[in-house]
């Protein structure tokens, strides 16, 4: 239960970092270590080189522009929780982050680490999916932007080549009085969710949906956005019929089975969670909290 | 994989402050902070339960923040202030959280206790007047298999009261 021997690197800048990733053949980037360290301790991964990026200060920031908020990959989950500006612009982050591990792991766990580890039930990838976040990736050749739609290639496999480094995530802002809700179900507080659901919603003056996003995590190998259904319900009101149709829609998604929970259970749970999140989000968009 | 690698053990020099004492020395880079504290410094009060971040027994304070010392490398502690269970008491005077555990019978075998104590010291600093739900959430990342949580929660409440009065 100790990591296999490796060579430790601690680049002090982004340029040093991408120079390293361009040359090392079997390296793992160590962000907050809340997933990689257990995997190394259990020797599920035994990299030749470990690149600790905790000293690359350029990767730690929260910035706001008119239409976006941008978060550096090495921003700790705890820092996201304590940003009052973020709480105003995107209150769903706070609601979702409270489910991420425990306060001891949030002190070190980072947003970029979570997005690169890409556990199917993790909350931060679910948020990136909900917001259609843009992932800013850098290597020695230059920078590229990957929409979240293309980020998840397969089970726990982000769209990253060995020389690539995730630099930041860019989230489009929603209207200031948008409704939001993030709900999940786990056996114990802080455990990975069995399933989770997130909803963002904008209503116009007569309570008609002008914009909506619905994501389910934990049901399949990557977060599922109900994009077709979202388009269908724009222009409608959130009422019992609409909520029933959302639950029907969830029945159509592909869900996975594992040793603990069957695909049918995940499907039913997802339906219940989407229902709860949709109700809560609509209620909040209506001005109630 | 064995031979070649063993010849070139990757080591670093680090400077850390542990429980108020400065320490300079060499650490193998694959050592966790917990192993560094236990093996290099002989501070065996930090216990290792699961070594993959689930049980919370190895919790220590790094620059005042509670973290899992099995999920941080010793080399990453370079330049930091560490507080372990050995650093909580003031000479022969127990820390109020330790005293509350003793009075409330918040421990039996004691294996998980260092992690609970460091966790609660950090938590009560941030939230000096928590309700029971908040206490239970704060300790949800620490596993105790023999005492049960009733007396631990009682100890946390009692400690919060003492600390508030200070």
Image (cartoon, helix red, strand yellow):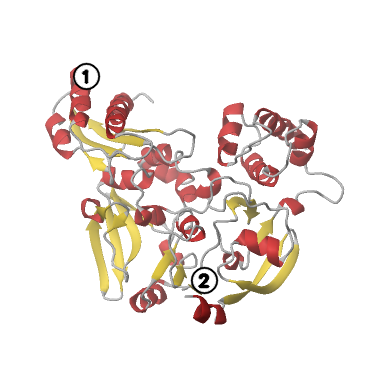
Alpha carbon distance from label 1 to label 2? 58 Å
Task: Please determine whether, in this image, residue B142 is positioned above or below residue A166.
Answer: above
Tell me the subunit letter for badge 2.
A
Q: Secondary structure at mark 1?
A: loop
Task: Please determine whether, in this image, residue A28 is positioned above or below residue A125.
Answer: below
| Viewport quadrant of the C terminus of chain A | top left
Tell me the subunit letter for badge 1.
A
| Residue A66 in view, yes or no | no
Q: Which residue occupies the extreme right position in the image?
A: B92
Mark 1 or mark 2: whose residue is earlier in sequence: 2
Residue at image x 24%, y 41%? A224
Q: Secondary structure at mark 2?
A: loop
Task: Please determine whether, in this image, residue B102 is positioned above or below residue A29.
Answer: above
| Residue B155 in view, yes or no | yes
Q: From the viewer's perspective, tell me whether residue B50 is left or right of residue B20.
A: left
Residue at which label 2 appears = A5
Residue at which label 1 appears = A239
Mark 1 burial class by Cα count in 10 Å: few <14, some 14-19, many 20+: few
User: Residue A93 is drawn in which quadrant?
Assistant: top left
- Where in the figure is residue B78, as x and y percent of width and height? 61, 68
User: Residue A259 is drawn in which quadrant?
Assistant: top left
């Amino acid at each position: 239960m100790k990591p296999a021997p490796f060579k430790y690197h601690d680049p002090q800048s982004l340029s040093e970092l991408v120079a390293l990733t361009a040359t090392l053949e079997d390296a793992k980037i160590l962000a907050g270590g809340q997933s990689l360290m257990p995997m190394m301790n259990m020797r599920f991964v035994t990299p030749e080189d470990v690149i600790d990026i905790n000293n690359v200060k350029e990767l730690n920031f929260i910035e706001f522009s008119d239409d976006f908020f941008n978060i550096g990959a090495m921003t700790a989950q705890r820092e996201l929780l304590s940003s009052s500006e973020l709480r105003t612009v995107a209150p769903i982050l706070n609601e979702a982050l409270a489910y991420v591990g425990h306060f001891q792991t949030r002190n070190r766990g980072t947003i970029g680490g979570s997005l690169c580890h890409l556990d199917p039930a993790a909350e931060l990838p679910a948020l990136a999916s909900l917001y259609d976040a843009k992932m800013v990736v850098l290597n020695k050749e230059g920078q590229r932007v990957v929409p979240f739609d293309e980020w998840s290639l397969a089970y726990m496999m982000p769209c990253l080549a060995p020389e690539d480094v995730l630099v930041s995530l860019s989230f489009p802002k929603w209207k200031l009085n948008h409704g939001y809700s993030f709900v999940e179900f786990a056996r114990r507080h802080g455990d990975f969710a069995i399933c989770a659901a997130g909803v963002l919603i904008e209503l116009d003056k007569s309570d008609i949906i002008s914009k909506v996003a619905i994501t389910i995590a934990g049901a399949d190998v990557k977060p599922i956005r109900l994009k077709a259904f979202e388009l269908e319900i724009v222009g409608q009101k959130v009422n019992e019929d609409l909520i029933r149709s959302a639950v029907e829609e969830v029945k159509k998604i592909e869900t996975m089975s594992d040793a603990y929970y069957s695909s049918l259970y995940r499907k039913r749970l997802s339906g219940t969670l989407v229902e709860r999140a949709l109700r809560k989000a609509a209620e909040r968009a209506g001005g109630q909290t | 994989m064995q031979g070649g690698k063993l010849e070139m053990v990757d080591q670093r020099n680090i400077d850390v402050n542990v429980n108020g004492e400065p320490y300079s020395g060499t650490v193998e880079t694959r050592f966790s902070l917990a192993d560094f504290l236990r093996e290099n410094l002989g501070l065996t009060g930090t216990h290792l339960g699961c070594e993959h971040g689930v049980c919370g027994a190895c919790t220590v304070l790094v620059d005042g923040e509670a973290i899992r010392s099995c999920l941080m490398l010793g080399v990453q502690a370079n330049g930091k202030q560490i507080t372990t269970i050995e650093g909580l008491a003031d000479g022969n005077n127990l820390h109020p959280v330790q005293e509350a555990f003793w009075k409330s019978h918040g421990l039996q075998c004691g294996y998980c206790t260092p992690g609970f104590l460091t966790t609660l010291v950090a938590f009560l600093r941030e939230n000096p007047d928590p309700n029971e739900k908040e206490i239970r959430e704060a300790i949800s990342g620490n596993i105790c298999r023999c005492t049960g949580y009733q007396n631990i929660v009682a100890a946390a409440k009692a400690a919060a009261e003492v600390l508030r009065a200070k």
